[in-house]
Amino acid sequence: MTEVRPGAAASAPLWERDAELAAVTEAVDALCAGSAAGSLLVFTGEAGIGKTALLAQVRALAESRCTVWSARGGETITSVPFNVVRQLLQPALVALMPDEAREYFGDWYDIAGPALGIAEPGARQADPQGVCDGLVAAVRRLARREWPLVLLIDDAHWADQETLHWLAAFAERLDDLPVLVVVARRPGEAGGESARHLDMLGALSRPMPSLRALTPEATAGLTRATLGEHADAPFCREVWAVTGGNPYESVELLAKVQDSELEPVEESAAELRALNRAARGRGLVDRLEGLGVDATKFAWAAAILGTQISVDLAAELAGMQRDEAERCAVRLSVARILTEADRTSGQVEDGELEFVHPLIATAVYRSIPDALRTAMHGVAAAVVTASGLGAAAASRHLLEVHPDDDPELVEQMREAAGEHLAVGAPDAARRCLERALLEPPLPEVHARVLYELGCATLLTSPATTIGYLRQALTVHGLEADLRVDAVCRLSSALVHNDQLEEAVAVVDAEADRLEPGPERMRLQAVHYMWEGIHAGEEDAPGRSCRLAQLVKPLTGRDNSERALLILRAFDAMTRGENAEEVAELCDRSLVNGRLAPGLGWTDTEWSFELLMMLGISYTYADRLDRAESLFTEARRSYESAGWSGGHLALAHAFGGYVLRRRGRLKEADESLREALRLADRVGHGLPMHWSAACMLIDTLLARGHVGEAEEIAERYSFEPPHPSTIVLPDTHSIRGRLLIATGRVEEGVNELETAEKMSEDRGGHNTVMAPWAGDLARTLAAEDPRRAAEVAADARVQAERFGTDTAIGEALRCAAALETGQRSVALYAQAVAYLESSPCAYEHAAARVEYGIASRSATEIRRGLTLAESCGADTLATQARTALGEAS
């Protein structure tokens, strides 16, 4: 049993915490011994069970050997984004000069700095995932500077959602970092995303049982340690019965016994229940009121402000002078209601206070009469604003104020929302704007607030965005340009919510209202963009014809025209029209070979899908240099802006696919796996997962890693039903190839024939983007050679129509595989000639090996083997070595 010296009531909750202290000691010892891996301990338990005291003991164990930083969540400040992580890192942030911080954080300074309050935010909305990644990187750098480092987070169930997002991500990366993270929380207090993050922490933590109430024996030991060994058994037993073994209540009750000079004997035991009532709930409130009106007002003000309470702000909120406030603080400290904030970590300023225990803070806050509490929050908002802390800091108080037709409050909440968005806290921004709607806004502002709400949730909740933008479009007051922008954003949210047909209908309805001009053309471009990615559209040839007619006279004089040129290029590429014309359309959409101003990767006027279409059009037109440059620019732009979500995932995916087309299969494999890792953090079963998984499966099959391809297909449910949007490369083609490679030939043929049917419906196809014909012809060759020859011949015609070296070379490879003798050798020789001129090294390697085998040329096989090895095409290389062995 863990014992303490007599009278040490503060240490009393550590009775019967031997297992927990052993785990902490072991973790601190490992940390100080130079263990490269960090660790996480999560202690859970009901209110008053001793979590805070346990963290205090962790500090006592660690602070002489480690750097220790600590922070605490607060029941009334869960709406303040990054509050707890700012508390936690404040010692390090205070120690760093601005220039030193910028140099130390490097590229992450502008991304994580605003969330930490050490840098001004940028002009654009920050990506929450990017900010989280920036915080992880920043803390990892600080940890290496301060190691060995111990991070203590108390009352994590009341930590803000943004901190918990960071903490969960940080905890996943402790395997190579000398950091011990110790978290204390109550079970069942958090909900939504916060609960999910806390559950993740629990799963990552070393298994620890929940903290339990003290046994009668431990309570007796605690009683005698506090009051003296003369406390008799009946008295000790009654202490346990009254408190239920709750450590906090036991400590408070024993303190009251000391204050009242009650003898700890059986005759006094009957008085314990009355004393216990005075230590909590209504009894605590009565005790507070007994300290006087001023002390009560000051305690109320402190409860309104939350944790790390500024004496100056509390005094102003309570309406008293500084010296009077200090006297109240002393009285409340003597009464064990307030205490000076823990300054051992160096993270608080002089004069800051905090409640002795969260239970006291809760009781005091809830004791304030409802109407007065609301009014005090309103005054607190004014006090915080006047102190220069900004609209975002005041917004948590304004959230508690009753609606009152106050235009000024609406503007304050809009300003606060902007500040929250700028630091990567869209949920906090949403709360502010939703509160502004309740006021309600003036008629001329109402539509604007709805529009801003839709924009605030665009990156995090398409369904929420849809609702608010629909409302904004039905309320009078949106200026013409904002209205068009709202329609475009609404359509984008609908697409990402798998409501593609509705997205097109919304755009069309708005376009019909407008006269010809740039805004109408922008909507037309959006219409064709969404139709262009619709996998199951009914009139693809008709749409292509209409798009071609619309684009014919355009010169690319503005971004609407440039967008239409890109869309026409993409449509022509997917239908297998002339590749030179595709590339020429792509080139016309650029300005001096670069993306036009306002049409960049992080510009919000146009959806990122448009530029992905541009890059992929260049890819399949064999302009891989241009495609690689575009996707590299995308990745760098997103990383620089701190966009670590779906945008960056797709940049890695399409950049990886360009590497696949180049034949750099190992690098493509790595990039595509990174794309899937990033996409996994955004959600599950999204269209981006289909694209990245399809590209990776295609790459793994080219490498000959069929088992890995099958595992990826299973992990990401790469099976019907297929998404309503186009996936590149064609999913039916790649899934058919996978099924055939795994021996499920009949199912594979069915998939390939589905791809064939879809190509017919479109009026043409790109034989490289949708490579079903080659696999179908080869599979049918043995049982239905006539049908196989027809498929191969049609593919060759289509490839020559498109005209790239890759398309023609692949069609010739297929034709050669169906022939024998010199006819086969001649076709292979032609295939090699075309593919040697193409930028696609893997296809060239395959053609070389097949040509060498058909012509029995060891020289050609060796050349193919060298190419296969440089590509990372392992099975192809093995095939070439086997052929060389047989030839010798």
Image (spheres, rainbow, N blue to C red):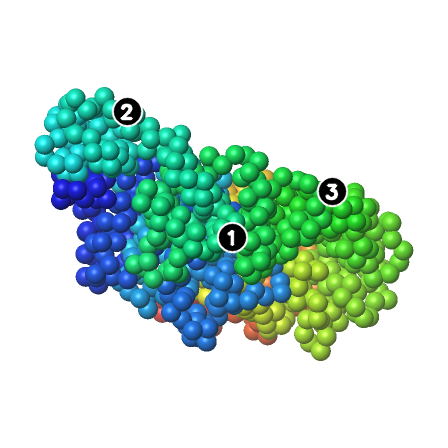
Nearer the observer: mark 2 or 3; the answer is: 2
The secondary structure type at the circle numbered 1 is helix
Instruction: Indicate the quadrant containing the C terminus: top left, top right, bottom left or bottom right.
Output: bottom left
Question: Callout 2: few (<14), some (14-19), or many (20+) C-alpha neighbours within 10 Å?
Answer: some
The secondary structure type at the circle numbered 3 is helix
Name the residue: 20% across, 23% down.
269
Measure the alpha-carbon separation of dots 1 and 3. 41 Å
Nearer the observer: mark 2 or 1; the answer is: 1
Residue 833 seen in the figure: no
User: Which residue is tagged 1?
Assistant: 316
Amino acid on which the number 1 mark rests in the picture: Glu
Nearer the observer: mark 1 or 3; the answer is: 1
Residue 510 seen in the figure: yes
Question: Callout 1: few (<14), some (14-19), or many (20+) C-alpha neighbours within 10 Å?
Answer: some
User: Which residue is tagged 2?
Assistant: 273
Name the residue: 39% across, 50% down.
327
- Above or below, 322 against 52 in this view is below
**Percent x, y for residue 798?**
70, 59
Name the residue: 42% across, 49% down.
307
Name the residue: 39% across, 32% down.
286
Which mark, residue 471?
3
> CB of mark 2 within 8 Å of CB of mark 3?
no
Amino acid on which the number 2 mark rests in the picture: Arg
Lower sequence index among marks 1 and 3? 1
Lower sequence index among marks 2 and 3? 2
User: Is 797 left, or right, of 457 in this rendering?
Assistant: right
Residue 180 figure quarter: bottom left
Amino acid on which the number 3 mark rests in the picture: Gln
